[in-house]
Amino acid sequence: MQVDFYQLTRDPAEKVLPPIAQRVLDGGGRLLVVSSDASQLDVISAALWGWKADSFLAHAKAGDDDAIQPILLSDAPDAANDARFIAMADGVWRDEALGFIRAFYLFPPSHTYNARTAWRTLADKENVERRYWKQDGGKWVQGP
């Protein structure tokens, strides 16, 4: 499984998640977006609806026909929509992410310690490939 660490130094999670979600959907996958902050999930929901002027990314919050949602927003890492991809938007690592084929771990500078701890812990896990991404101007580049 692959874990992508996204250090959010310029853009917040609601700006970073729509293109990630679009790539997951384009590949035929489903995505679970997790945050323990209900207001953050509201902001992410609005961003997914309005990401592009000519389209939207269909989604719902957990508890609303979960099984049919291509993108499910939840406060728990439970893929009721059969997602194989998970995005943790609140900067909190969850070990349940290891049950998915790919995890996107988005963290702001205030959660750098948490991210470093998760990075070190995952180094000892078999079959886990870690990647670190940082913002360089307006694009994402893979770090060392």
Image (cartoon, rainbow, N blue to C red):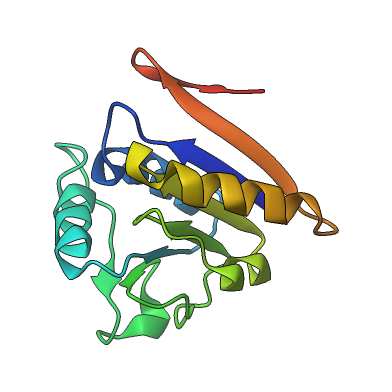
User: Could you tell me residue 72's position as x and y percent?
Assistant: 35, 70
Q: Nearer the viewer, residue 99 or 125?
A: 125
- Which residue sits at x=48%, y=26%? 134
Vertical comparison of 97 with 140: above or below: below
User: Could you tell me residue 38's position as x and y percent?
Assistant: 19, 69
The mark total stands at: 0
Vertical comparison of 144 with 33: above or below: above
User: Could you tell me residue 7's position as x and y percent?
Assistant: 44, 35
Query: Please, which residue is most extreme toward the top here?
Result: 137
- Quarter of image, res 40: bottom left
> Does any portion of residue 26 appear in the rendered image?
no
- Quarter of image, res 35: bottom left
> Does any portion of residue 109 appear in the rendered image?
yes
Quadrant, the N terminus: bottom right
User: Could you tell me residue 136's position as x and y percent?
Assistant: 42, 15
- Which residue sits at x=30%, y=86%? 65
Task: Locate residue 136 relative to residue 104 in the image: left or right.
Answer: left
